Amino acid sequence: MRKEVLVTVALAKRKAEQGVDYSSRFGAVCPECGRTKMRVYHTWPWRKGVRVRDHKCDNPECLVCVLGLTIKSTQRDSEAVSA
Ligand SMILES: [Zn+2]
């Protein structure tokens, strides 16, 4: 594999690992291709005002999808945090 390809793959993996914020309007947005409302793969229970979801991008042209990476989104409930 060419070095540029490896770098691109590494960057996509890093973006996926860093995760994204969950928006009630757009859901989780893919950090690679920008697709909104990525399919939810697993939803974790609320914990200290934070809910984490695992997503998979289903855009066949997106590297995150091609590599089968899971993207974590974080949703914060501000009321629960301040309570
Ligand atoms: Zn994507």
Image (cartoon, rainbow, N blue to C red):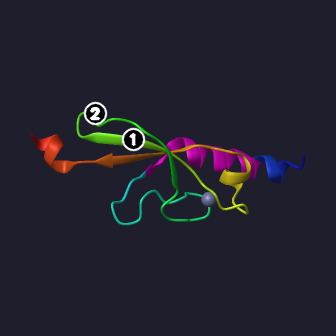
Q: Residue at x 81, y 53 (%)?
A: 4
33 relative to 20 in the view: left or right: right
Counting from the top left corner in percent of width and height, residue 22 is at 39, 54
Give the numbered dot on residue 52.
1
Between 70 and 6, the one lying in front of the other is 70
Q: Residue at x 66, y 62 (%)?
A: 59
Counting from the top left corner in percent of width and height, residue 62 is at 69, 60
- Which residues lie in the magenta part? 7-20
Identify which amino acid the numbered label 1 is placed on.
Val
Q: Which residue is mark 2?
A: 47
Q: Residue at x 61, y 64 (%)?
A: 33
Q: Are marks 2 and 1 in contact (CB under 8 Å)?
A: yes
Q: Residues within 10 Å of mark 2 (few under 14, many from 20)?
A: few
Residue furthest to the left in view is: 83
User: What is the magenta segment's predominant secondary structure?
Assistant: helix
Quadrant that contains the C terminus: top left
Q: Is residue 14 above or below residue 37?
A: above
Between 58 and 12, the one lying in front of the other is 58
Residue 52 painted magenta: no
43 relative to 67 in the view: left or right: left
Tag 1 secondary structure: strand
Q: Is residue 51 above or below residue 12?
A: above
9 relative to 35 in the view: left or right: right
Identify which amino acid the numbered label 2 is placed on.
Arg
Tag 2 secondary structure: loop
Q: Is residue 31 above or below residue 10?
A: below
Give the CA separation, mark 2 to mark 1.
Answer: 9 Å
Q: Quadrant of residue 25?
A: bottom left
Q: Residues within 10 Å of mark 1 (few under 14, many from 20)?
A: many
Q: Residue at x 89, y 49 (%)?
A: 2
Determine the quadrant in which ligand 1 lies.
Answer: bottom right
